[in-house]
Amino acid sequence: MLITSGSLGPTAYAQRVPTGTNQIAFADFEPGSAVPAWDYGYFYSDGNIGGTQARERTYAEPPDGKNHAFRYWFDTTVFAGFNSWWGTGFGMPVPWVNDPAAFNSEDLADYILSFDARVEGLAPGQTTARCVMEFRLGTGPNGDRWALVKALPYRPGSNWTHFVFTLAEGSFISADGQPQTSYQTFLDGLLAGITSVRFNQNHPEPTEFGFDDDNAIYLDNVKLEVVQYDAPPSPPPPRVALNIFEYDQDGKDVWWLWPNYPDTTQGWSANPQKRATYWGDRLSAGNGVGGSTAIKFAMDNSVMTEPLPGWAGGNIVMGGPANYAHLKSGNLRDYRITFDARVEGLAPDQQTTPVTFQIYFNAPDGTLGAPDGNRDMLLRQNVTISGVRSNWQTFTAFLSDGEVNAGSLANFQAHWQRVDEIQFQFQILNAHVVSVWGADNDNAFYFDNIKLDFMAIGTPALRAERLGNEVVISWDPPETGTVKLLWGNTIHSVTNEVSGATSPYTNSVSAAPRYFRTMWVPPPPGT
């Protein structure tokens, strides 16, 4: 950021001011107004059973019938005594401006999703229902190439309640068998052009409604808006990677990996008789990038024959040395994972498969409560990477691109400074999909150059305040290294160091403009 002392008002800051919102999409379900063109309902379960459901896109609300809403009615009687997973839900498009230019921000926090909801038919003693708004942005001619799928949990009761989220909230998920979406796929979608705004509304295992035929959820006034500002966004500050761990298995090794061959205890399956076997080799010589050493994760899924189980998977867990001093915040957006990966043994005509990276942040016993003899897991985060091929590729993602699998973000944000152990694993979550893997014993992932970095802000932004004939320039300290203050007489000549300047720095106002910027100075090597 550049600041001139000759053109300041009372206060100048490196930030934009919101001026309002622009509406992108809206559904009020009023006849002749904003009503979605179509909708659908569904049940999903382990066992392929389902109940009965019906929808009304312009349901007239009692008592006078003047207000309309969407109504989803469903009968759960068939699930009484059913002991596995199941759920129900519905989906539809949201009428929108049909202009990709409406998505004019790359910041998910600038997009505001709001809606009204209520439910009927809750079981005795139940006051709210567990619901998930699965909001979707799509690209392509049919609008079904998902750039963004966000799961936003909420709990409506019997009275109308207004819910508001930003698209920075919730977790990224996969949809319709397509790979996991992420912030990167959202950015890619903006470049390709958003062509659809849709949602699914899910009730995972909706036992709060009991097992009967009087269950319903209502939605109204579904709206997506984008925040507008008084100026274009400032360029993001440069960031520098502070390495927490790096494993290349050629001198930078994980300390342990489990299961090692021939241990085969890490699989799971909806049908215990159809559990694939898995094994790992933390020093797979010659199989890494350029013929180096790699980590091998192998699978034999020969048992995956008809009838296939509803789900099956497996994993290898590992850990090693780490620099915990480089854990510097509780924000998952500050942490980046990078690794090289390739796959062997995919079914004929199958070119890619996803893999899930799962990371554990552990703290000393007693961090989360009374000591119980075990370490406390603050957070277990899943990040699913799509498109792993037979040739080596480098994959990069931020931990915020994933979803919480166990523990909580609140625990991590409260206690990240106490983390003294990190474990991670790679997971195969589609072992039962024989169209991807076949059903044989020649399946394997190879991983190399696995890194976790904290992305520190390198150059802090400037703030300036005019006090009489003086301008006070200040900046926050960087997370690592130091800062020099530079000045120049033109916007293109800000190269002169203000010797010994620290924040806040006071500069006298003169007739000639003077421009300032900060320059980051990295710490000495090895610190």
Image (tube, rainbow, N blue to C red):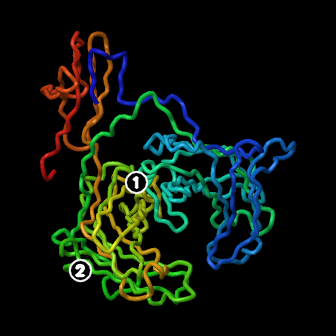
Above or below for 293 versus 489: below
Q: Viewed as shown, does residue 327 lie left or right of 373?
A: left
* Residue drawn at point x = 24 percent, y = 73 percent: 255
Above or below for 445 versus 491: below
* Residue drawn at point x = 36 percent, y = 26 percent: 13
Q: Which residue is mark 1?
A: 184
The N terminus - image quarter: top left
Residue 406 is at least partly visible in this image: no
SS state under label 2: strand
Above or below for 135 versus 471: below
Quarter holding residue 90: bottom right
Q: Can you tell which mark lies on residue 25?
A: none
* Residue drawn at point x = 35 percent, y = 74 percent: 317
Residue 270 x, y percent position in the rendering: 55, 81
Residue 447 is at least partly visible in this image: yes
Task: Please rate how many residues cluster around mark 2, counting C-alpha atoms within 10 Å: few if below 14, some from 14 to 19, many from 20.
Answer: some
Amino acid under label 1? Gln
* Residue drawn at point x = 24 percent, y = 52 percent: 242
Amino acid under label 2? Ser
Q: Viewed as shown, does residue 487 lie left or right of 75?
A: left
